[in-house]
Amino acid sequence: GRMGGDHYCEAFGPAIFDVEKPLTKPGIGVDQLPDHIRLSKILTGNDLGQLANIKILPDDDAIEQAKKISGDNKEVSIHKLAKKLIAEGKVKEALTLLMTLDL
């Protein structure tokens, strides 16, 4: 892709991903993500962008259901699993899982 001036770049493999474009209502934005998500050493800027594009934060019921599945996993394990879910296109599920750390 064109980068400006005389510069171009080529992207392939995991460097290419889809981000849903908000057609009606913008996403929640990175600022609305809890600190442990925004400041994650595991999630990339691209991961955060996809999470921030979610229309609404998961409700308490969805978070409680995800907490039953995640159990007492450590924060690092949950962030790694969330990163995997994002790569699979399961962004809403990833955010819900990450939100279990806030309860």
Image (tube, grey):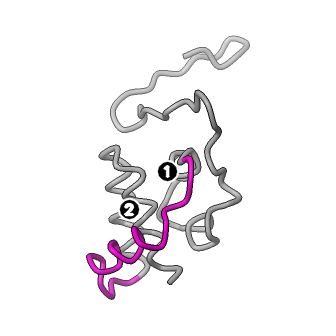
Pick out the residue farthest to the left. 69
What's the magenta region? 55-74
Task: Looking at this view, name the residue that lies furthest to the top.
Answer: 6
Q: Residues within 10 Å of mark 1 (few under 14, many from 20)?
A: many
Task: Give the residue drawn at x 63%, y 51%.
Answer: 28
What amino acid does circle 1 point to?
Asp
Q: In the image as oriented, which residue stretches furthest toward the bottom? A: 72
> What is the number of the mark on residue 47?
1
Give residue 100's quadrant in the image.
bottom left
Report the residue at 29% width, 84% height from top: 71
Crowding around mark 2 (Cα neighbors within 10 Å: few <14, some 14 to 19, many 20+) is: many
In the depicted structure, whether residue 81 falls above or below residue 29: below
Q: CA distance from mark 2 to mark 1?
A: 9 Å
Q: Are marks 2 and 1 in contact (CB under 8 Å)?
A: yes
| Horizontal arrangement in the rendering, residue 71 relative to residue 30 (left or right) | left
Per the image, is 96 magenta?
no
x and y, in percent, of residue 41 in the image: 53, 67
Identify the residue under disc 2: 82
Relative side of 83 to 68, left or right: right
Is label 1 in a helix, a strand or a loop?
helix
Kindly identify the amino acid type of the residue bearing the numbered disc 2: Ala
Instruction: Provide the secondary structure element on which disc 2 rests.
Output: helix
Return the x and y of residue 10 as percentages of the image width and height.
Answer: 47, 21
Spot occupied by residue 83 in the image (x, y as percentages of width and height): 39, 58
Residue 55 as seen in the image, left or right of residue 17: right
Q: Quadrant of the N terminus?
A: top right
The image quarter in which residue 82 lies: bottom left
Q: Is residue 56 magenta?
A: yes
